[in-house]
Amino acid sequence: MNKMIGALRRTFGVVREHVGTDHLGNKYYIVPEQKTWTGRLVRAKRLVEASNPTEHEYMEGSIPIEWDAWIRGRRKEPPSVEELAENEAYRQQIKLKAMEVEEKDLALKAKEYEQGLVATPSRTVAAGHAAATSFGKQELGEEPTSTANTFQPGSWRPNPKQKA
């Protein structure tokens, strides 16, 4: 009976078995190992039928990580619904913790700037083109206006109109 089923499969094309569907609507299939009519062994294949089949609209993350690992043969069994839900909850938890750490870091930096422990970063807006020799350089003023946070060596020159 199995030989007859195999002959029908080879005659009428490849039969694929539906393995699962992810939350994005992508469908996953496996084509079992088969023998051709000549007796050659054809390895099993894993396929994905994308919910959005146009290639130019493919975005990274269109296939969940667990399913991607199954498609590429890095795991033997397809992911279960429970595993997918558990991993998604874990990823959300990590994102929340990262946001908390970032907020604490920003608060600590603000406190250090306030107390004068760290100099505030200078925010120089450069005018002109990057190829120009004066790009990013501040124009020299007549009055010494530099402070400890923005002092640049050689940035002040005495007024040539005043003579001692």
Image (cartoon, rainbow, N blue to C red):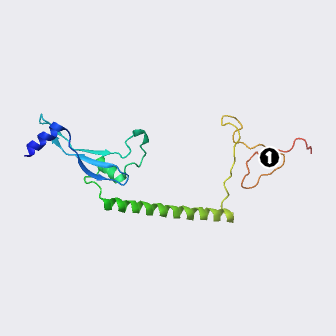
> What amino acid is labelled 1 in the image?
Trp
Q: For the view shown, which residue lies furthest in the left direction?
A: 1
Given residues 68 and 23, the one toward you in this image is 23
Q: Is residue 161 left or right of residue 61?
A: right
Which residue shows up at 20% across the image and 40% down it?
14
Which residue shows up at 68% across the image and 36% down it?
129
Which residue shows up at 15% across the image and 38% down it?
10
Q: x and y percent of residue 26 in the render?
A: 34, 49
Q: x and y percent of residue 32 in the render?
A: 19, 45
Q: Is residue 112 left or right of residue 158?
A: left
Disc 1 element:
loop
Task: Tell how many labels.
Answer: 1
Given residues 110 and 56, the one toward you in this image is 56
**Residue 141 position (above or below residue 149):** above
Q: Is residue 13 left or right of residue 75?
A: left
Q: x and y percent of residue 84 in the render?
A: 34, 59
Can residue 35 be seen?
no
Can residue 19 be seen?
yes
On-image quarter of the C terminus = top right
Q: x and y percent of residue 22 in the render?
A: 34, 53
Count neighbours of disc 1 (C-alpha within 10 A) and say few if under 14, some if 14 to 19, many if 20 or more: some
Residue matched to label 1: 156
Given residues 155 and 14, the one toward you in this image is 14
